[in-house]
Image (cartoon, rainbow, N blue to C red):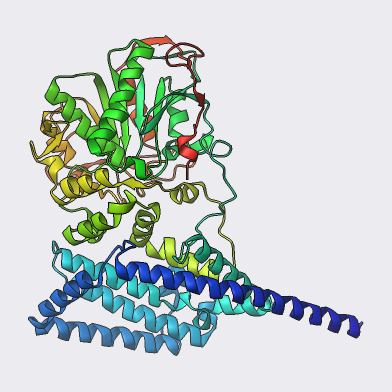
Amino acid sequence: MQDNATSAETTDIAEQTERLARLTNRAMMATAQMQGHAVKQASGAEYALMDAGTLAKAYGTFWSDMMSDPTKLMDIQKTVGTEMMAAWQAMFGMSSDEQVKDKRFKDQSWSDDPISRSYRDVFLAFDRATDGLLDRLPDGSKDHMRVSFYTRQMMSAMSPSNYLATNPAARKELMETKGESLLAGLENLLTDLERGEGRLDIATNDEHAFEVGVDLATTKGEVIFQNDLMQLIQYYPTTKEQHATPILFVPSWINKFYILDMKPENSLIRYALDQGHSVFVISWVNPTRDHANKDFADYMIEGPLAALDIIREITGEEKANILGFCIGGILVTAMLAYLAEIGDDRIASATTLATMVEFENVGEIGVFVDDDRLESMRSHMAEKGYLDAHHLQDMFSMLREKDLIWSFVESNYLRGQKPRAFDLLSWNSDSTRLPSAMLLWYLEEVYLQNGLRKPDALELKGVKIDITKIKTPCFILATQLDHIAPWRSVYPATDFLGGEVEFVLGGSGHIAGVINPPTERPKYNYLTSATYPASPEEFEAQAEVNEGSWWPHWARWLDARDSKTVAARKPATKGKFKAIEAAPGSYVKAD
């Protein structure tokens, strides 16, 4: 028996040695790819989200401000001393572990292991002191915002939860698995580096768990039209009668359209069909070099305006409702102003979801957008004609770095685990490229110049637009924790738009707050108000809290504007707009 056990152990060691040798070879190749990627970034051939010069200027401004007020430094030193004393006391059991709420340290082993506990408490002490310092920065300065943002990135990277030597849960797993977790983590790391061709492309989701058209985007419909920029999908009805006025969904083109049609239970498209609406949806193309010169106005003309012409021909209705999500909502808002200027009243009502109209305070995403970054991006895209999808994906991940970067570093690499299947993260990783002409115009004219809110500042196909001339009834949803479209930059639409406005403030963030279907156990509430005071804070103070999903509230708002019904409309099997292919179509599946 002992000989058999010894033989099995020898076999295990041999297999692990062979596996380690294979991983070592992969690591050498991955290192070469990383070096190549670094050289491209240094030479400017690969776009970087932030350059060293901009960062140095920001920190230079910060220290100059700090040195001009010595009392600030003294206060910070005092705060650091107090926090370190608290950490010292915790090391000797003089304070309670119940005070630690940070989920990075939720595992009981952080409290049981005195060495790891000391690492944790010292780190948290510095983290709190750093937060205190950053809280003293004056608001409004982009340099100070950069300092705050990148200091937080550095502090998050320094957390002892990110390192095997200081993470007791990872060390325990290493011992229990006899090294298997370490090898699996190395394999995960190499796989992510290989997929990113030298760039660390962190897996946040089981890439084999979902297939578009099989598990996601399964609502039955047909592609009835396509052009260079989009496919137009018409969905089969789920009711015997439908509202006479059809509705067109205009999704963001930064990710794929199926955020609006995830699984059946959380599909906004399916929900609209069940409420008796005749639903059409734009599925944007994933741009290539051939789309380099497509600008924002092209997205309007070849996107919603082309779709609305087709919907009018199919349904015979002069007007349609429209819904826009994120940048799709910005396009819808700009289009409404364009139509107002040319005297076209084809839109019966408009809904925008997580859509900013005020770009003065865009939140932390503003650290990535300035004149220098714009020029760097222009140079990078001159040859390619587009911005690769991963740049925006990396940027959005950094806005929630603890959840979307470092939590996966710990689980994937330190503990050798595979990411779990999660539909929203699967969609989130399915990003698209962005054509250079559209992106540069949008960032310069809308983001940097705040042109959307300024009368006649933006011009689309020779027409200057002014959103205050929009008289269309508008339903506007913002979400409280949105880090991409901060709700305080959405709320000004209640003042800027010239027609009836229904503003709703949902819970959670940019995605979870929007994709929040009615359930027996509601996740998030939403806020409404009969009037809209000047400031977002006043709105929040007076608003009524409503239980559950905002979807039924929106459905009632739409119903109140269209009492006429018609026989349910099905996609045509013949004629000018007969089915080309089944939904979700081919554009959404293009890598």
- Residue 388 position in % (x across, y down): 37, 53
In the image, what residue occupies the spot 53% across and 68% down? 189
Of residues 585 and 243, the one drawn nearer to the viewer in this rendering: 585
In the displayed orientation, state which residue is furthest to the right.
1
- Residue 550 position in % (x across, y down): 36, 36
- Residue 37 position in % (x across, y down): 41, 68
Residue 387 visible: yes
Say above or below: 166 vs 147.
below
Say above or below: 32 vs 355.
below
On the rendered structure, is 282 left or right of 296? right
On the rendered structure, is 85 left or right of 462? right
Residue 254 sits in which quadrant?
A: top left
- Residue 365 position in % (x across, y down): 26, 57
Residue 52 sits in which quadrant?
A: bottom left
In the image, what residue occupies the spot 25% across and 39% down? 295
On the rendered structure, is 484 left or right of 175? left
Of residues 250 and 29, the one drawn nearer to the viewer in this rendering: 29
Tally the marks: 0
Residue 533 visible: no
Of residues 159 and 126, the one drawn nearer to the viewer in this rendering: 159
In the image, what residue occupies the spot 38% across and 55% down? 393
Of residues 43 and 343, the one drawn nearer to the viewer in this rendering: 43
- The quadrant of the picture occupied by the N terminus is bottom right
